[in-house]
């Protein structure tokens, strides 16, 4: 039975190849940043709507989110996620156009056989991965409440069944002082930039005493307007990360203490703004789902490295999804090994024919896991059992 389903799924994705690549390139050449992805979400949702999906847009209270569903019967719902936000200035330097295409392709592939399965597939468009926390807001709005498992594939320079990611927060600091002529009356001024610079110094001193998995990094976004004016205002943006949320919160508290200490030392005042959608949880990938995806991809002729905790990693809001349901977030190589993402080179790689060939293969594997999850209740039960065990041991949050 399953072999016939698999053959039909793969054939359907193959038959849509040209349209899928055109969709990816359209998103790639028209980059939109976090929460501004109106044209991308419209393009992807219409693509699915034209192929018989039932589309809800906006979704979960977000204008640029959508849910497109193909229903078989009242079985479990499996979500396939699509990201489509770009980076400021650089465009699709993280290749989210390919995530969008992979998710769309996989959902269309599964829809071909959904009437022969016990369950539903939902393509969920999740905006603002690059800092705006679309999935943080969607999880909070209950957008995954009826979903049994969620999956997506991210492009990279190596093909991996998964990796963990860091828990993270974005923080903005705003220092206030008092302007004065920097040469004639410096004694009358209070230098807001000094508060910010002292924060960097305190943060760098703290760094020596942090665990190796902690990451604290920042930029100055406002540092005064002229050399002859004592800056009355200075601001910076920071990112505070660690491998688990408990330690990340400790680092965040210590970082805020650095900022407050710097304000006290310089006579400035500081506002600390922790972005509420920036609380990215650490990613805990589902082992059975990730491994099954890898098996399918190997069968399609692509080598896959196993999930590793040792991989260098950033943060993703898919971590938040992985804390509430079994979730997989593997990587497909679309660029030469070692090429970093968030660069112009990676952006250009994300538009090549080779990248699209690999992404289509990743989509076929993703569609095949989805079919397995609906056709083999034991696989979904295994994923669920692992997730519940992780809740018991505190590896994911208890609810
Ligand atoms: Zn990304």
Image (cartoon, rainbow, N blue to C red):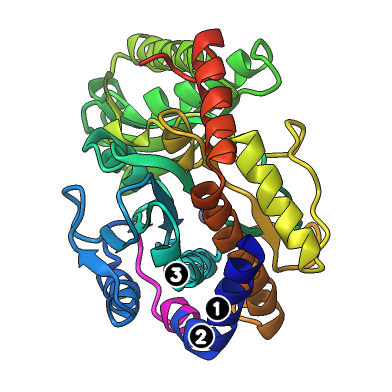
The answer to whether mark 2 and mark 1 are in CB contact below 8 A is yes
According to the image, label 1 marks what residue? 13
> Which is more toward the observer, 67 or 216?
67
Q: Which residue is mark 2?
A: 16
Look at the image and give the residue range highlighted in magenta.
24-33
Mark 3 element type? helix
Q: Residue at x 61, y 62 (%)?
A: 1
Q: Is residue 357 left or right of residue 373?
A: right
Measure the C-alpha gap from mark 3 to mark 1.
10 Å
Can the viewer see residue 197? yes
Q: Nearer the viewer, mark 3 or mark 1?
A: 1
Residue lying at 65% horizontally and 35% vertically, measured from the top left: 287
| Residue at which label 3 appears | 104
Give the crowd class for mark 3: few <14, some 14-19, many >=20 residues within 10 Å: many
Q: CA distance from mark 2 to mark 1?
A: 5 Å
Label 2: which secondary element: loop
| Figure disc tally | 3
Q: Going by the image, does 351 lie left or right of 178?
A: right
CA distance separating discs 2 and 3: 10 Å
């Amino acid at each position: 039975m399953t072999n016939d389903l698999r053959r039909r799924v793969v054939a359907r994705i193959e038959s849509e190849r040209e349209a899928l690549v055109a969709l990816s390139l359209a998103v790639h050449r028209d980059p939109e940043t976090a929460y501004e992805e109106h044209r991308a979400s419209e393009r992807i949702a219409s693509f699915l709507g034209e192929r018989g999906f039932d589309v809800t847009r906006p979704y979960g209270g977000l204008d640029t989110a959508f849910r497109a569903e193909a229903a078989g019967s009242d079985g479990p719902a499996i979500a396939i996620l699509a990201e489509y936000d770009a980076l400021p200035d650089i465009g699709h330097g993280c290749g989210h156009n390919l995530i969008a295409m992979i998710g769309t392709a996989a959902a269309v592939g599964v829809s071909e056989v959904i009437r022969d399965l016990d369950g539903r597939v939902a393509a969920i468009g999740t905006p603002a991965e690059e800092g705006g926390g679309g999935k943080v807001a969607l999880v909070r709005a209950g957008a995954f409440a009826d979903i049994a498992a969620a999956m997506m594939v991210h492009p990279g320079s190596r093909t991996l069944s998964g990796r963990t990611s860091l828990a993270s927060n974005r923080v903005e600091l705003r220092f206030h002082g008092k302007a004065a002529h920097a040469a004639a009356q410096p004694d009358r001024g209070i230098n807001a930039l000094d508060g910010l610079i002292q924060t960097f110094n305190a943060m760098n001193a703290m760094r020596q005493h942090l665990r190796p998995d902690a990451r604290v990094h920042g930029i100055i976004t406002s540092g005064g307007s002229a050399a002859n004016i004592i800056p009355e205002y200075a601001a910076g943006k920071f990112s505070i990360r660690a491998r688990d949320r408990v330690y990340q919160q400790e680092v965040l508290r210590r970082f805020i203490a650095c900022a407050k200490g710097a304000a006290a030392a310089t006579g400035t005042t500081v506002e600390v703004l922790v972005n509420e959608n920036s609380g990215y949880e650490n990613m805990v990938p589902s082992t059975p789902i990730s491994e099954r995806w890898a098996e399918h991809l190997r069968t399609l002729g692509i080598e896959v490295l196993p999930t590793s905790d040792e991989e260098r990693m950033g943060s993703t809001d898919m971590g938040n999804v992985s804390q509430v349901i079994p979730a997989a977030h593997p990587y497909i190589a679309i660029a030469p090994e070692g090429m970093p993402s968030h660069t112009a080179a990676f952006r250009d790689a994300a538009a090549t024919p080779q990248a699209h060939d690999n992404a289509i293969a990743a989509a076929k594997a993703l569609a095949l896991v989805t079919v397995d999850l609906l056709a083999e209740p034991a696989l979904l039960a295994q994923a669920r059992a692992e997730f519940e065990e992780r809740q018991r041991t505190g590896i994911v949050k208890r609810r």
